[in-house]
Structure formats: structure tokens, C-alpha cells
Image: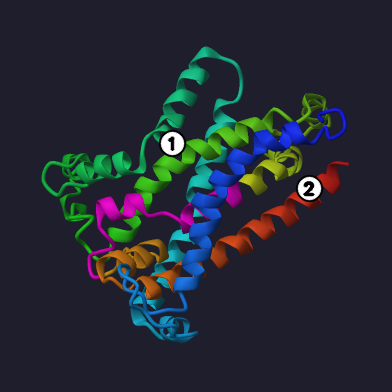
Amino acid sequence: MLRRHPWVLPASFLLLPLLVYFAFVILPTLNSLYYSFTDWVGYGDDFNFVGLANFEKIFTDRLFGNAIKNTAIWLALAMTAPTGFGLVLALALQGKRRINTIYKSLFYLPICLSPIIIGIIWVWLYSPKLGIVNIFLRAIGQDHLATAWLANPNTALYAVFVAWAWQQTGLNMVIFLAGLTSVPTPLVEAAKVDGANYWQTLRQVVIPMLRPATVVVFALTAINALKSFEVIWVMTMGGPFNKSDTLAVFMYSESFRKFKMGYGSSAAVVLFLMTMVIIALYFRQTSKAEELYD
């Protein structure tokens, strides 16, 4: 049978992973889509089909608009801060020196920790009285800058973002380091021979050659930013006054705190569509990069 149908053996190995993927990814996604058209509260089977009513409501909901705004701010910061710092660290730590290996491990360590652990660590760091952040500010004579970072509506979102970016930067650094290994050394040396200084070589040779790695970093960072939840929930639960409420937090709050599973599912569908757009752009840019190097 295997000689007649050589595809049977590979298919049998793929069957179980595909079933698991369908059960834990595809099926819940389809269920969420279905419930977004209902007024289900999250338990029981007593619910009605309401059509597009949830989507009509969600785009006039002030709290949803606030979550969209916060998500846009979070996404804009995510595409600059951890991406930029990841590139700087990669450029600074490229090479095989032992000290570089140690620093790489230290900077990569946060991505190995659970987001919940990251949140707990930074809650302690931001503590108004015992936190290292305020202690440092007072030590350098900047007492007026010390504040309750997570309780202040003006700083809560940005304080939580710093914690998330601290974890994300290590992953971006590793991707850029992998990209730097593909930059041809003769090309860099030729630029130096032609009289280019470090910054000219970086701008004209290294950065363009990092385009494939940059596309991966942007795509992963955007997706991780859109689905950020654990760190925000541990640190502020979307507060104070919904100032750190993002789409992921809004979706969870509506579904599991207010028992509006149908309404929360409509927010999940919006978030899913935004993620799909980013993935589509990622594949488009990847295909362009492959054509460039073919």
C-alpha cells in the first residue's frame, strides 16, 4: 500500500497535529465569529441571533473607541522603540567575543519569562514608595518626577508599554543578529575601501541588506502588540479609567467580566481582521524581498 500510495505515511503523521490545530485554533475562531452575531452571555444556550447589531454598536461605543486609540498608540510605539533598540543592540553586540555572548544572553532573558512574571516585576519597579524607578528619581534630585506610574492616567499606558518593550527588545535583537550574519563581509569591506565611514556603510550597505530581517521584526512586533494582554492585565487591568485599555483587554473585559460574550466576540473579530491585514502585508513584503534576492 505504501508503495502504491507514498503519501499515506506523511499524511498519517500530519493528521494528529492538524486535528489538534483544528480543535484549538480553527474551531474556537469559527465559534467566536458565530457568537459575534448573537447576544450570548457566555454560559447556557439561551441566546438570540442579532445579526450585525454587535458590530453596529461596537463602532459607536466610546470605550471601544478608547481601546482603538490606545491600541494605535501602543502599535506606533511598538514599531519604533523595541525595534530601534533591538537593532542598536544587534549592531553593538555582533561578533563572537565572549563578552558579547554574555550580553546577548542577558538581553534575551526577558523574552524567556512569562508575560505575567514580567508584569509582576514591573509592578514592583513602579511601586510609588519602594519601587526602584521612584527611588532612583529621588536619589538624583528629581522628586517632582516621582509618581504612582500605574495609577496616574497620564502615565499608565506608557509605563506598561515600557515593561512590554523590555521583553520584546530581546527577540528583535536576535532576529537582527541573524540578519547581520547574511550581510556579505566583502561588500562592507569594499564600502570602507571606497572611503565610506561607519555611518555611511551602515546606511548604504548594512540597513538595506537587513530588509528581510526588518520585515520579520515589524510583522512579529505588530502582531505581538495587537494581542498584548497579560502584561497589561497584571499591571493595570486596563485602568485607571480605561487609560491603558487596549483591544485585547476590551475584548476580555466585555466577554468575561461583563458577561457579554457575543459583544466581546465582535471585538475579537475586529482584532482578528487587523491581524490578518498585517500578516497579508508581511507575506507581500516577504515575496518582494525574495524577488529582490533571486
The span shown in magenta is: 217-241
Q: Which residue is mark 2?
A: 289
Q: Is residue 210 shown above or below 226?
A: above
Residue 176 percent location from the top left of the image: 61, 36
Considering every residue shown, the one lying at the far top of the view is 98
Total numbered badges shown on the rendered structure: 2
187 relative to 220 in the view: left or right: right
Give, as a three-letter code, the residue at label 1. Ile
Residue 200 percent location from the top left of the image: 72, 40
Q: Which residue is mark 1?
A: 111
Q: Is 234 inside the magenta-drawn segment? A: yes
Q: Residues within 10 Å of mark 2 (few under 14, many from 20)?
A: some
Residue 276 percent location from the top left of the image: 61, 62
Residue in view at x 39 percent, y 47 percent = 164
Residue in view at x 79 percent, y 25 percent = 189
128 relative to 262 in the view: left or right: left
Q: Is 141 inside the magenta-drawn segment? A: no
Residue in view at x 54 percent, y 44 percent = 20
Picture quadrant where residue 180 is located: top right
Give, as a three-letter code, the residue at label 2. Ala
266 relative to 209 in the view: left or right: left
Along the line of sight, which residue is nearer the eye, 263 or 26? 26
Asked if residue 80 can be seen in this view, the reply is: no
Do the residues under discs 1 and 2 have CB atoms within 8 angstroms? no
- For the C terminus, the image quarter is top right
Residue 279 percent location from the top left of the image: 64, 56
Q: Main SS type for the magenta part? A: helix
Q: Secondary structure at mark 2?
A: helix
Label 1, label 2: how many angstroms apart (C-alpha)?
27 Å
